[in-house]
Image (tube, rainbow, N blue to C red):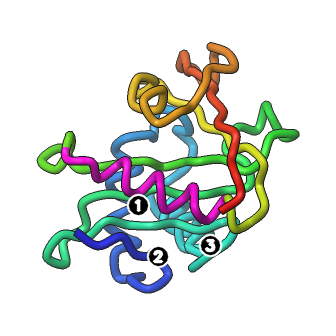
Amino acid sequence: MEILPLADKKEFIAELAELHHAEWKHLNPSLTLEGRAEAIAEAAGREGIPSIFIALSRNQLVGSAALVRNDMDTKPDLSPWLAAVYVKDGFRRQGIATQLIARCEDEAIRSNAKAWYLYTEFASSLYEELGWRHMERCEYKGATVDVMFKRLRPA
């Protein structure tokens, strides 16, 4: 398993856009697949904010996670955010999401963030296991989500 910046493997942008679109289009139905691919390409920094990291197994895309400036337009004062944590079905429960999140966390620390944020519909328990704390449960873009945060310690 390799964790790499998407910037180094741009040939996976289209596939990643399809996976993200299938998973999260309900949160932004007006965003087309092409628009999502463009947004992913723009956020695919190699380091800093924004950056996207992918997990590859035998040169097959199996997951992603992103560090972005903001992921909830209703909370513009909070930054940065963990976003787009995704692992393909056949690869779940193998620690891949944890590795991707850790890579994003390292980047957040390098960017001098003191805390970072996320929202999730279904994975609160995973994040709690990784030290995240609940801020609130709210409605966002038609879904009930948990907003969470984690304090960061300098390396």
Q: Residue at x 48, y 26 (%)?
A: 128
* Residue 114 spot, x, y in % from top left: 78, 48
Task: Pick whichever, 142 or 89, lies toward us.
Answer: 89
Report how far apart the C-alphas of labels 3 and 1 lie in the structure: 12 Å
Dot 2, how many residues are within 10 Å of its Cα: few (below 14), some (14-19), or many (20+)? many
First in sequence, mark 1 or 2: give its number: 2
Q: Residue at x 51, y 29 (%)?
A: 120
* Badge 2 amino acid: Pro
Q: How many marks?
A: 3
* Badge 3 amino acid: Glu
Q: Is residue 126 above or below residue 21?
A: above
Residue 47 placement: quadrant: bottom right
Assign a secondary structure to mark 2. strand
Dot 1, how many residues are within 10 Å of its Cα: few (below 14), some (14-19), or many (20+)? many
| Tag in front: 2 or 3 | 2
Q: Where are the magenta residues, as a range? A: 94-108
Return the residue at label 1.
Answer: 17
Dot 3, how many residues are within 10 Å of its Cα: few (below 14), some (14-19), or many (20+)? few
| Tag in front: 1 or 2 | 2
First in sequence, mark 3 or 1: give its number: 1
Task: Pick whichever, 64 or 25, lies toward us.
Answer: 64
Assign a secondary structure to mark 1. helix
Residue 117, magenta (yes or no): no
Q: Residue at x 34, y 45 (%)?
A: 22
Q: Residue at x 53, y 33 (%)?
A: 131
Return the residue at label 3.
Answer: 42
Return the residue at label 2.
Answer: 5
* Badge 1 amino acid: Ala
